[in-house]
Amino acid sequence: MKKLLFVLLSISFFSCSSDNNSEPQPPVDNDVFIRGADMSYLPLIESEGTVYKHNGVNQDPITTLKNAGCNAIRIRLWQNPSDGHSGMAEVKTFAQRVKAAGLKVWLTVHYSDTWADPAHQTKPVAWQSLTFSSLKTAVTDYTNLVMTEINPDIIQIGNETNDGMLWPEGKLSTNETQYLELVAAASTAIRSKSTTAKIMLHHGGLSGSDWFFSKVANIDYDYIGLSYYPIWHGTSLVTLQNTINSLGQLYNKKVIIAETAYPFTFDYNDYTNNIIGLPSQILPAFQATPTGQRGFLSTIKNTVTQSNYGLGFCYWGSEWVAFRGPTSTNGSSWENQALWDFNNNSLPAMEVFNVE
């Protein structure tokens, strides 16, 4: 009887397995799992004299990250920033340093002179008066220049482009066709300069991501990027997992958590108001301690790896310590979420970058 039952169960199993062959399969991708850190402030911070440490000894922070297992450094690029920081010259030099260290360069092109995010997508000053046709040409020319000068391994067309970029012409909700033309122009320029660079489109948060990626379904790109911060994007890791799976399956793309972070304390190390300072802003399962920060990042990594579509994560604001001193009011609003503590010593969360 047991043998008969085994045979029947085996027939049933293989029958069900055959039916599953019709389901969408994850994209075949030989790319390595991304274990990234955004270090965009580093040139500025180092220029003002800050030194980072590992186990109490001065150490190049890029070296510390690499030794921990980090394999990609994310860098923002602004078109013509007022103080030069995050501009082409600084970013090119920084990217060369990252490449020399043997790490991937992940470039976030904001297509703006300053911060671009869901609420702000301001055109560069030099492009303000351009006709739409000339704006497309400017996007093409600038993207070509970026690829020639920096040649990144991963390149984002915009940052948190929930409602497009280069407003008002590229505002997705009101000028969908024009936004798609601008993104297509950038994508075409990237492909013309590199056969290996991976193109990412980036949505800030989980809510609305399905709408956004449905709009760009016909754009030539490689990776779906998502930001996930509990303070802004909810405390449900199940929702995060489901979003990764659903977007990856629907659009047959690999998904990367392009930005995330977590506090190791609610204390502060300068007089610049911090973004996070209350228990209600974090996940109950992970306290604002070095152990809690490590636990959160480990869970994010595991959430991504458990999906057939997950390809990595990036920790944002890794380097943003209180670099202007304890009384500064224009220092860091993120020092309690950095990957170095208030003595600029590396934190246990870095252990999550390991390859295991």
Image (spheres, helix red, strand yellow):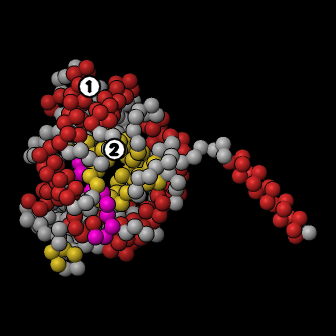
Q: Is residue 130 left or right of residue 256?
A: left
164 is higher (above) or lower (below) than 12: above
Task: Identify the image quadrant of residue 188.
Answer: top left
Residue 124 drawn in magenta: no
Element on which disc 1 rests: helix
Q: Nearer the viewer, residue 77 or 16?
A: 16
What stretch of residues is rendered in magenta? 67-76
Q: Which amino acid, by three-letter code, is at mark 2?
A: Thr
- Residue annotated with mark 2: 196
152 is higher (above) or lower (below) than 135: below
Residue 21 % position (x, y):
66, 46
Residue 156 % position (x, y):
31, 43
- Quarter that holds the C terminus: bottom left
330 is higher (above) or lower (below) than 353: above
Residue 38 shows which numbered tag?
Answer: none
Residue 303 % position (x, y):
48, 60
Is residue 83 among the parts visible in the rendering?
yes
Residue occupying image coordinates x 17% and y 23%: 129
Residue occupying image coordinates x 29% and y 55%: 104
Residue 73 drawn in magenta: yes
Specify which label sits upstream in the sequence, 1 or 2. Answer: 1
- Residue annotated with mark 1: 136
Report the mark closest to the observer, 1 or 2.
2
Q: Which amino acid, by three-letter code, is at mark 1?
A: Lys
Residue reaching furthest bottom? 56
Task: Identify the image quadrant of residue 35.
Answer: bottom left
